[in-house]
Image (cartoon, rainbow, N blue to C red):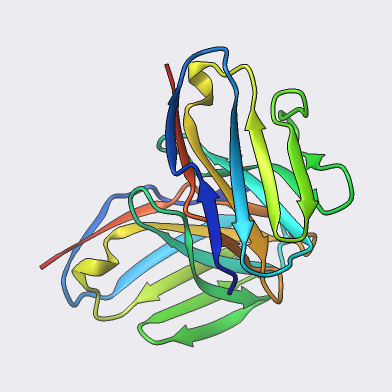
Amino acid sequence: QKEVEQDPGPLSVPEGAIVSLNCTYSNSAFQYFMWYRQYSRKGPELLMYTYSSGNKEDGRFTAQVDKSSKYISLFIRDSQPSDSATYLCAMGTGFQKLVFGTGTRLLVSP
Amino acid sequence: SAVISQKPSRDICQRGTSLTIQCQVDSQVTMMFWYRQQPGQSLTLIATANQGSEATYESGFVIDKFPISRPNLTFSTLTVSNMSPEDSSIYLCSVTGEGYEQYFGPGTRLTVT
C-alpha cells in the first residue's frame, strides 16, 4: 500500500464547475499538508499549505484536512480553463521530507 | 517565496555520460532538496543538501550515481553519472519556506539516448 493515494484522473469538468480533488494517506504521523499545481513542462507550484486538521481558504481554493479519516481535499470553485493542470498532494511529518501523491490531471473545458 | 532557477532547462545526453544540473536560489536557504519525476510518475526525493555537510540520500539513491554539491546557501548542483535511458526524467530542486512547505524550481528535463 502506498503512503499516499491519489486518483490519477483525468477529471473533466465544464467551466464554472466546483472541482473536488482528494488524497488518502496511511501514515498518521503526517502533520502538514500541501497542494501543488503543475502545468505541463513546468515545476510544481504551491497552492495551499495547511497544518493539522481543518479548513483553509484562499480565493477560489479551499483545502480541507481530516486527520481522523486520513483524508485531504482541495476544492476549486468557479473552475476556469486555466485551472487545467495536474494537481499533486504532498504531506510530511515535520522533518521536511515530503511524500507526494501521483497527481490528478484536471481538464476544464470552456 | 524564493525564486529558484535551474540550468539547463533540458538536455539530451548519450548513454554513459554525465550531466550536472545547477540550482540557484535568490535568497539564502539552509536546506535544498533534489527530486526526480519520471514520466507519468510523482515526485521522488533523491537527497537533501545542507550547506557545509554531506548530502543525505534516500533509499535507492547513492552518492556515486548522484553526487551533490552545496558550496553556499544559494546554490547546489546535482550530477547524474554514467547515465542510462532509465535516468530520463525531470529533475527538480526545492527549498523550504517559512514553515515546512517547499518551493520548486522549473525543473531540468533530461533525455538519455
Which quadrant is home to the N terminus of chain B? bottom right
Name above or below for residue B93 compared with residue A30: above
Image location of residue B64, percent across then percent down: 76, 23
Image location of residue B25, percent across then percent down: 63, 62
Which quadrant is home to the C terminus of chain B? top left
Image location of residue B50, percent across then percent down: 81, 53
| Quarter of the rendering containing residue B73 | bottom right
Query: Is B20 or B93 nearer to us in this picture?
Result: B20
At 26% across and 61% down in the image, what residue appears? Answer: A84
At 87% across and 42% down in the image, what residue appears? Answer: B54
Residue A36 appears in the figure? yes
Q: Residue furthest right?
A: B53
Question: In the visual, does B112 lie left or right of A26?
Answer: left
| Quarter of the rendering containing residue A110 | bottom left
Name above or below for residue A94 compared with residue A99: below
Query: Is A18 or A60 nearer to us in this picture?
Result: A60
Q: Residue furthest left?
A: A110
Question: In the visual, does B113 lie left or right of A2?
Answer: left
Image location of residue B22, percent across then percent down: 60, 45
Question: In the visual, does B71 lie left or right of A105?
Answer: right
